[in-house]
Image: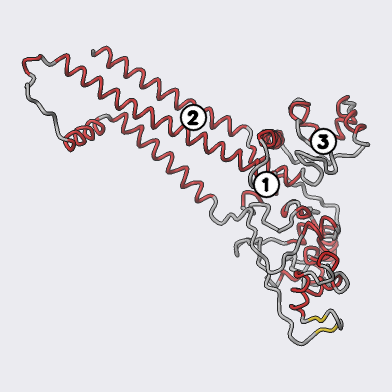
Amino acid sequence: MRNVSLIFGRLAKSLCLVVGLTFAVSLSADAQNDPKAGEALFKANCTTCHLVQGKRVGPELLGMSSRYEEDWLIPWIQNSQAMIAAGDETAVRLFEEHNNLVMTAFPQLSDDDVRDIIAFVEAEEARIAAGPADDGSGGSAGGAGSSDATQFMILGLVAVIALAIGIMFVLGKVVRTLERVVETSPEKLAPAYEGPTTGDQVKAATLRFLKNKKLVFLVVLVLVGVLATAGWRSMWNVGVHEGYMPVQPIKFSHQLHAGVNQIDCQYCHGGAYKSKNASIPSANICMNCHTGVTGSEQYGGEISPEIAKIYRALDYDPNTGEYGDNPKPIEWVRIHNLPDFAYFNHSQHVVVAGVDCATCHGPVETMEELYQFSPLTMKWCVDCHQETEVNADNAYYDQLIEAHEKLKKGEKLTAAMIGGLECGKCHY
């Protein structure tokens, strides 16, 4: 019987080792290709031209991984024109098949970044093959599904560990009971023995558990890991409002204005070119179009309810074309909020660096209701700054050089010449 106990101990150690290795392998496999990170990269770089299912400017990406090898896809996504210039047969064929349409180069994407994008596309393919999502959320549903699958895997492994601990405890108790039966002679057994009470059994089991230092250590280790993971995820997401979409006083559709009507972002948000803030347009900007565009075609000759809200805010009478004396501000709800200690200058990014609005705000032209596309965390900003090359060939640096030359010559140099008239210098 003692041999049985020894064999059981070895089996228990092997079981713990197998479960631990399975857990580690699953985590490392999940860390290699991150569909969630790929979703963010896809939205920031690819959605302008591509859809996973359906054609936009470029072809759809459904089945991309099955048609092309990963070793070919990575350099193609990073710089397709370089492969075409090098005479790659597949690259040249694709270029000709799509009417010589030039694909934007993405040298800032590392090999791992491209693998994450490929993993996101594969996750979307699996979601599409499984059928339409209940919430109809498109690409984000794929990223959410992959994240849910990862969490389900982790919870499943925790459950397996808990089950293994329970089996070890029960089998250990059975083995010890059998050992006592074999080692105890029948004469010493009391004929009318009724057994210990429930309280005594619980107390004895607790003591045996506390004496088993290896089992106690394993349980404590699992609890610490679960609590640390939950705490870390909670603290990491404090203040992160990715996907935040408040209800606005007027249902302004960016999809209609920026997408269908192709109105440039800076027509309404002119501050992005000259100031720290992009600025929310005044209602007078809206009236540049909506003195004539009333939406009556869709409402049987009546003014659109949303356009009527603009008229009421300006105290405007569409019948006479006159403004009253009682205008009221439109109380828009702010979506993108940075901490007070974080300084972000729109003009520096848009004019000097040439950053496209979609890099931070996402595919606004597809949003019926605007929401926060990017996490806007410090890590997200730092990653962008580490990957983005400085373009010194612009007027901003020319003015700096001119200012330094004036200083060298002892000529007059005013604050206005070095950006002193920028609104964001004084107005936050």
Please report the residue visible at 79 percent of the width from the left and 35 percent of the height from the top. 77
User: Disc 3 or 1, which lies upstream in sequence?
Assistant: 3
When the figure is inspected, residue 93 is found, relative to residue 229, above or below; the finding is above
Q: Which of these two is toward me, 115 or 306?
A: 306
The quarter of the picture where residue 332 lies is bottom right
Q: Position of residue 377 (x, y in %)?
A: 62, 53
- Residue 421 in sight from this viewpoint: no
Indicate the amino acid at tag 1.
Gly
When the figure is inspected, residue 143 is found, relative to residue 350, above or below; the finding is above
- Residue 281 in sight from this viewpoint: yes
When the figure is inspected, residue 284 is found, relative to residue 127, above or below; the finding is below
Q: Which residue corresponds to mark 2?
A: 23
Cβ–Cβ below 8 Å for labels 3 and 1? Answer: no
Disc 1 from disc 2: Cα separation: 33 Å
Please report the residue visible at 84 percent of the width from the left and 72 percent of the height from the top. 412
Q: Which residue corresponds to mark 1?
A: 136
